[in-house]
Amino acid sequence: MLSILIPVYNYSISSLVEDIHKQATNAKINFEIICIEDGSTKFVDINKAFVDSLDHTSIIYSNKNNGRTKSRQILSEHSNFNWLLFLDADVMPKSDKFIVKHLENINSNYEAIYGGFAYKNIKPQKNKTLRYNFGKNFEEVNAKKRNLNPYQIVISANFLIKKSIFSKINSQIKIKSYGLDVFFGGLLKEYKVNVLHINNEVYHFGIEDNKVYLNKVKEFISVLLKLYNDRMFFEHSNKLLSVFINLKKYKLNYFISLFYQMFNKVMERNLLGSKPNMFILQLYKLSYICYKDLDS
């Protein structure tokens, strides 16, 4: 019935796997949990010992880091059931009915179900406020709002999908990078996959420090721009890309690019500080994509 698939990179998965295994067992379903150590150098032996102690649970090992997109493809190819539940290693179900809630939608007309993201209401460390604040403001979104534009907030850390649909979509993503959920969402929209969002969140714990996350933001924008310029995006619901395209249409991107050149250091000081402003983050993204486009 259900393959639960977890890509892992240098992270302890004992708590997550224990919780998921218990829930799936209590649900009295046919299931398997497959993890892949994606070139990990930490926690490998600990993870192996724990997984080996559980039935219906296994680990695949990769000698190199393939990234989550390819790792998910490998996991899918090793799976035995028609429904795939993908979870990132750094999450934990919010509810002890997490598996049951996902299973409620298996017999519906939906082909992909997104459970959502949540963050504990605990003040983060000062050097991790950027990622935390972004998550609280832009990822922790009620299902009712997400369903208004189902291809926009597509978070791959917690989603259930038909294996046939996943194989068709994911196999088209050939690049390895951070932030490819927007591309996956665009392909779901292009292929008119019936998507449902539900309030069945996982808590996100793997919060990067501010500098690491800001570099990932810039990496994401570079990839987004490449996808657009290489005409790999036929459909999308990304707000940043939509605004950028409109600015470029009226040649306003030149002014926004100049703004980045003049004020990027000022914006970065705010974003790397203990109280990053989310409006400044959005302005930083928009000005950076305009600058990057003209600079390439």
Image: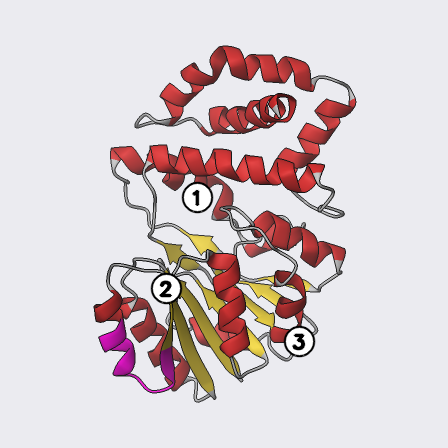
- Spatial CA distance of label 3 from label 1 is 29 Å
Disc 2 secondary structure class: loop
Numbered label attached to residue 108:
3
Q: Residues within 10 Å of mark 2 (few under 14, many from 20)?
A: few
- Mark closest to the chain's N terminus, 3 or 1: 3
- Is 77 left, or right, of 165 in this rendering? left
Marks 2/1: CA–CA distance: 31 Å
**Percent x, y for residue 116?**
50, 57
Element under label 1? helix
Q: Nearer the viewer, mark 3 or mark 2?
A: 2
Sequence-wise, which precedes: disc 3 or disc 2?
A: 2
Q: Position of residue 63 (x, y in %)?
A: 37, 64
User: Which residue lies at the image location 71% right of the left edge and 63% below the top edge?
Assistant: 193
The colour scheme used to paint the residues is secondary structure
Task: State the residue position of label 1.
Answer: 135
Give, as a three-letter code, the residue at label 3: Ser
Query: Looking at the image, is 56 positioned above or below residue 140?
Result: below
- Counting every numbered tag in the picture gives 3
Is residue 153 at least partly visible in the picture?
no
Q: Are marks 2 and 1 in contact (CB under 8 Å)?
A: no
Q: Earlier in the sequence, mark 2 or mark 1?
A: 2
Residue 233 % position (x, y): 71, 46
**Residue for point 64% across, 21% down:** 294
Q: Amino acid at mark 2?
A: Asn
**Residue assigned mark 2:** 63
Label 1 crowd bin: few (<14), some (14–19), many (20+), radius 10 Å: some
* For the residues bearing labels 3 and 2, Cβ distance under 8 angstroms: no
Quarter of the N terminus within the rendering: bottom right
Magenta residue check for 95 = no
The quarter of the rendered structure image containing the C terminus is: top right
Depth check: 175 or 164 in front? 175
Label 3, secondary structure: give it: loop
